[in-house]
Image: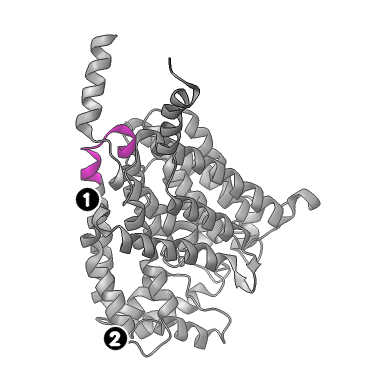
Amino acid sequence: MINKNQREKPFSIARNQMKLPLIIWLVFAGNIMAFTEGSLMGYRLTGLGWFLPLSFAVFMVLMRMDKVKFPILLWLPWIMVVFGYYMNSNYPALQRSVQLLCPILIGMAVSTYRYEEAHMERILQLSKYLAISLFVIIFFRLGVLVSGMLPPTTGLSGHSMTAILFNIIFATSYSFGNKIDLRWWWFMATIPVIAVTRTAIAVIGLTLPLSWGPMKFSRRFILILIIIILGFVLFHSPRIQHKSFRTGEGEMSDVLSKDFSDNARFFMWKNFDEQIKRKPWFGYGAGAGEKFVRQITNDKSGYPHNDWRLTLYDYGIFGTTIYVLCILSMMIHAYRRSKKSSDKSRLFFLAGASSFIPFMLLMYTDNIMVYVSFFGNLQFTLLGVAYGAKSRLGASVTTKKRLKVRW
């Protein structure tokens, strides 16, 4: 006879095996903290949202270095650039330097665990819960439930970045045949529209047709046409027109005119371009760009809303080229590894690789590189899970053959 404790033991073991590592919960919690943009005991939650998971990630990497599966060697040149420039900088650059390396450490820590298919399925489900939380927090922050209407402008660029990352996940999942995730994609696509973040609206539309998931070219082409039509309609909507033009209305041809409202971006970019030409190869040093922005804006801003220019200013062509090469090598490596993985880990590999396309596009008009609690930490969590996954193609093929014989 089997007693009660013996009967419950297998279930208890299975339940414990399906638990997610604490580092993943901290990344998700940090994301929610960033959504609220409040403060706790004098500390901004946006900062705690990346500092807490980073602190735990450093501890885990030191304790479990032999279990790291993340390809850290691909990022070693960039790590050396950031560290070297920080050590030789004449400007306060500690926080920015740490933020630039934070996602990489998160990816390393996440990859120290071995993930089953059920773990990855649970992470996908948690992403949907987090997407709902993002939507609800936005509505409360904008006071929509009280006023019954959307404000003409918002300051929710970080929230739009997270929505874009979710849409990469949902777009990739949809390409694998999960049709319900197309609805989730449309759900998240509304967030940049609500936030009136113009570049994010354009970028989020591309996450579906440009997903690296398995999708027919004809379907991608149709999706691009739909996105272009919807983009044209949104461009002429009252809220977009109000934010984009000082006179309140304009056409596509007026985007580069004096009437276009750029929030002083063009002014800052022009000044940056002039200074970059003077020291193009190795830049001015880590943290120099932030100081320069504060000078030309009378301390009203610390970032030029263009990570490409900021990186060129600080690290020059030398550092920026290394950064681009590291991104490209990461994308290629993840794509190749996806071919040797089971469906679930393949989904994570392709979603992680795809995420660098909108990331690089958003670098043109925002500072996504330091918005790690909104984008980077989640992005590298996907990659860390993919590299840490137990399931590989061989096991998947064997399972499919057994099912085929059985049925």
Tell me the residue at 34%/87% (across/down).
Answer: 89
- Residue behind mark 1: 333
Residue 279 is tagged as 2
Q: Earlier in the sequence, mark 2 or mark 1?
A: 2
Please state if 373 lies on the left or on the right of 357 as rendered.
right
Q: Position of residue 92 (x, y in %)?
A: 43, 85
Residue 218 can be seen, yes or no:
yes
Q: Amino acid at mark 1?
A: His
Look at the image and tell me in which quarter the C terminus lies.
top left
Locate residue 392: give its quadrant: top left
Q: Residues within 10 Å of mark 1 (few under 14, many from 20)?
A: some
Along the line of sight, which residue is nearer the eye, 336 or 232? 336
Locate residue 328: give its quadrant: bottom left
Q: Amino acid at mark 2?
A: Lys
Tell me the residue at 25%/60% (across/down).
Answer: 72
Tell me the residue at 40%/88% (across/down).
Answer: 91
Residue 40 is tagged as none
Does 341 lie within the magenta span?
yes
**Element assignment for label 1:** helix
Q: Position of residue 15 (x, y in %)?
A: 45, 34
The answer to whether the residues at label 2 and label 1 have Cβ atoms under 8 Å apart is no
Residue 225 can be seen, yes or no:
no
